[in-house]
Image: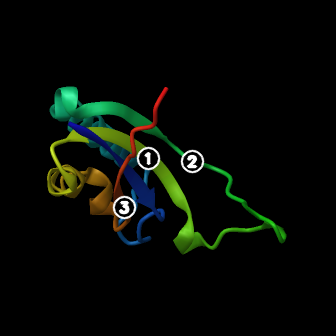
Amino acid sequence: MDEFAIIYVGQGTPDKMPKTKEEGMAHRQKWMEWVASLGDAVVSPGQPMMEHKLVSSEGVSDVAEDEKFTGFAVVKAENIEAAIKIAKSDPFLNMGGGVQVAKMMKMPG
């Protein structure tokens, strides 16, 4: 099986984001249940990202809100279609955010 990164993009849309601490905790619980339901397919449940800066040969700049990746997870799947199926079941999508799915290249060593 190959490994795929599920890269969270954006924070979600304001009308779909949790409005209270309780709603936030309920969403987190759904995400934790989703991760548990994936079993051995989960290589890393990942982490959320906080501060963002773009570093290039031209200097350091801010990252536009809609271009920020806000977290990641790594899963094992037979192919990208299977990884997309996993990503489509992610509760993060219910908040209006999106995910990118990318096959990770195996490096020697």
- Considering depth in this image, is 39 or 50 the residue closer to the camera? 39
Rendered position, 40 above or below 15: above
Determine which of the numbered discs, if any, sits on residue 72 in the image. Answer: 1
Q: Which percent across, then down, holds residue 2?
A: 26, 40
Residue placed under numbered mark 3 in the picture? 100
Q: Amino acid at mark 3?
A: Gln
Q: Which percent across, then down, holds residue 94?
A: 27, 61
- Considering depth in this image, is 104 or 9 the residue closer to the camera? 104
Rendered position, 50 above or below 44: below
Q: Quadrant of residue 30?
A: top left
39 lies left or right of 42: left
Callout 2 touching callout 1 (CB < 8 Å): yes
Determine which of the numbered discs, if any, sits on residue 49 in the image. Answer: 2
Task: Give the label, 2 or 1, closer to the camera.
Answer: 1
Q: Residues within 10 Å of mark 1 (few under 14, many from 20)?
A: some
Residue occupying the point 16% across, 33% down: 37
- Considering depth in this image, is 53 or 93 the residue closer to the camera? 53
Rendered position, 38 above or below 50: above
The N terminus, quarter of image: top left
Residue occupying the point 21% across, 50% down: 83
User: Mark 2 to mark 1: distance in Å?
Assistant: 8 Å
Q: Amino acid at mark 1?
A: Phe
64 lies left or right of 59: left
Q: Quadrant of residue 26?
A: top left
User: Mark 2 to mark 3: distance in Å?
Assistant: 15 Å
Task: Give the label, 2 or 3, closer to the camera.
Answer: 3
Q: Amino acid at mark 2?
A: Met
Furthest residue in direction front, as rendered: 108
